Image (cartoon, rainbow, N blue to C red):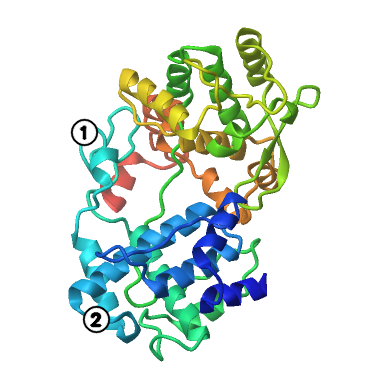
Amino acid sequence: MDELREELLHGRIDVPRVGEALAVQGRFPPFVVVDATGAEVAAAVQYLRDLALGDVSPLTCRSYAFALLRWFRMLWVLGVDWDRATSSEVAVLVGWMKSARNPQRTRRSGPAGAGAVNPRTGKRALSAGYAPRTINHALTVVYRFYDFHAHHGDGPVLNPVPVWRKQRATLSHGSPLEPLPTVRRSRLRQRVPKQLPRAMSDRLWDELFAVMGCDRDRALLSMYVSSGARASELLGIGLADVDWGRQLIHVVSKGTRLRQSVPVSPESLRNLARYLAEAGLPGDGEPLWRTRRGEPRQLSYWAMRRVLQRANERLGTDWTLHDLRHTAATRLANDPGMTLTEVRAILRHADINTTGIYTAVRVEDLFDKLQDHYARPRPTRQLAPGYDPDDVKIVFGD
């Protein structure tokens, strides 16, 4: 693999042919960056090929390719070669992203518009511009791009993306069981606000579950909210991945890509049994979750996302599939019978601090306690026996 990497980087073999062969094997996503004439940007393509050979997710390669395309478009507008870029060009990129409109927000902001708050769920739609996380991601991609070329002796002497060495040294030896230390952000890095988990209340969950129109959708939603599995993980299981006796399903984890066991509720298994009784058992090699119209085929993420969108249109909500994982995590983390370490094992978090954010108390969950508090009579002041109220009033006032 190292020899292949070197040959790819130095152009000593037919790159398109090798790229197509690796893409067929599912190991080399063919993402490239091209200029206005359609020619490949060699510096960006070299980095993306090295990234793909590092066995990262294809979605990571895709996001890095778009971030590099944005960076090169900025350099082309400024008339600066990529190997002569400085921190001034990086500052221009950050300034543009903070003021420009994100074209993806037009189709994702919903009917209420970008930045509007849904009155049913309390969730705020994405703003019209680029989010702080997106700006920080762009800085990370550009930094790693120049770091890669510096390793091979290309590009500028200094990385144009500012970095604070003390911050990297502080965060490099932290324990996942300890809270992260507070460090100063590097220059141009954006402050990312901490958000509460997007969990559903029991009432809103019952409403959502009631509008599901078939046993397949009810089985999927009940498995999502009882297991906390990610959307793509649950959609990828087969009939052999369901352990009926132990009430487990086996999913391929998004991060580690390992086949891991996840518990599910008895209710979700009953819904699954009803779905299989209606749709029939899948054959060898056939998916468990199948479409209901036309020739049966595997239910994709986008098809399941559309199921949830139709339910949102009926209820006036804006739930997403990942909100079901947040709901499961919040229920588990706030169960007094479960420890945080056990919840972390079920959710398969790499860092226990990630699991800890689901223990935050929401005002919506305190409704009954707040009603008791408001209905409780105001306590009256009582004086100890032997004190004259008039004397106390003279000394201390009203």
Q: Residue at x 33, y 46 (%)?
A: 392
Query: Looking at the picture, does residue 107 appear above or below residue 180?
Result: above
* Image position of 357 with respect to 231: above or below: below
Considering only order in the chain, which callout, 1 or 2, is on the residue closer to the N terminus?
2
Residue 325 locus on image (x, y percent): 53, 37
User: Mark 2 to mark 1: distance in Å?
Assistant: 40 Å
Task: Report which residue position mark 1 lands on.
Answer: 112
Residue 339 at least partly seen: yes
Q: Residue furthest top?
A: 278
Residue 105 rendering spot, x and y as whole percentages = 26, 45
Mark 1: which amino acid?
A: Ala
- On screen, 370 above or below 291? below
For the N terminus, which image quadrant? bottom right
Q: Residue 376, can we see it?
A: no
The residue closer to the viewer here, 295 or 122, is 295
Is 287 rendered above or below residue 181?
above
Task: List x then y, in percent, for residue 363.
Answer: 41, 36
Give the SS element for disc 2. Answer: loop
Viewed as shown, does residue 319 lie left or right of 270? left
The reply to whether the C-beta atoms of the residues labelled 2 and 1 are less than 8 Å apart is no
What count of labels does the image hold? 2
The residue labelled by disc 2 is 80
